[in-house]
Image: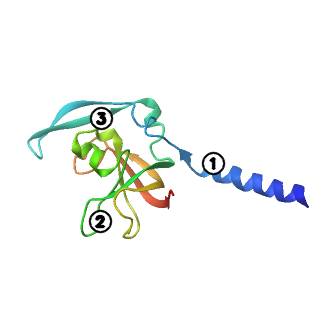
Amino acid sequence: MRNSILLICFLVSSVMSFGQKDVTWDDLSDVKFTNKYFPKYEEYYLHPEFAESIKALNGERITIKGYFLSLDPKGQIYILSKGPMASCYFCGVGGPETAIELLFPKKQNYKTDTIVSVTGTLSLNDSDVDHFNYILSNCTVTVIK
């Protein structure tokens, strides 16, 4: 009986580990940026060139830990940041590779700077300056205590 329980636990954990890939901020840091002109806005913006290791994650279900940021009073714009709000790249620390746009099926109620683990499908964005370079869709969140 005990062996059966251990076997079941092993199988469940094995199946769950294949469901998503744990990713760190270091994994996402292998990106180079150049200034590129975007005629729509008549401005130059940072254009990412993702390393092959990052391109391999495109479309994959990943899990990453960071700080939850709600940037919109209506609760429609959510970000996962490598650092807390006071240290995010909007404040001059790090770069665009240290933040991920989060897309949820419904409104979220986490407080800014809550440390979370987020699982979602990663999309790489190198052409739409209205969105982040990293986008996670169909997100689920676990609060880290």
Give the vertical position of 111 relative to 118 (above or below): below
Taking 48 as reference, is 105 left or right?
A: right
Which of discs 2 and 1 lies nearer the camera? The answer is 2
**Amino acid marked by disc 3:** Pro
Helix or strand or loop: what does disc 2 sit on?
Answer: loop
| Residue 7, horizontal then vertical, whole percent | 82, 54
**Kind of element beneath mark 3:** strand
Provide the secondary structure element on which disc 1 rests: helix
Q: Quadrant of residue 114?
A: bottom left
Rendered location of residue 118, percent (x, y): 47, 55
User: Residue 16: image x %, image y %?
Assistant: 65, 53
Q: Residue furthest left?
A: 42
Location of the N terminus (image quadrant):
bottom right
Taking 39 as reference, is 136 above or below it? below
Residue that badge 1 annotates: 18
Query: Which of the two labelled residues, at mark 2 and mark 3, occupies the earlier sequence position?
Result: 3
Q: Is residue 36 left or right of residue 15?
A: left
Q: Nearer the viewer, residue 102 or 110?
A: 110
Outermost residue, right side: 1
What residue appears at the point 75 percent right and 53 percent down from the top-left corner?
11
Residue at the spot of label 2: 76
Disc 1 to disc 3, C-alpha distance: 29 Å
Q: Choose mark 2 or mark 3, whichever is in front.
A: 2
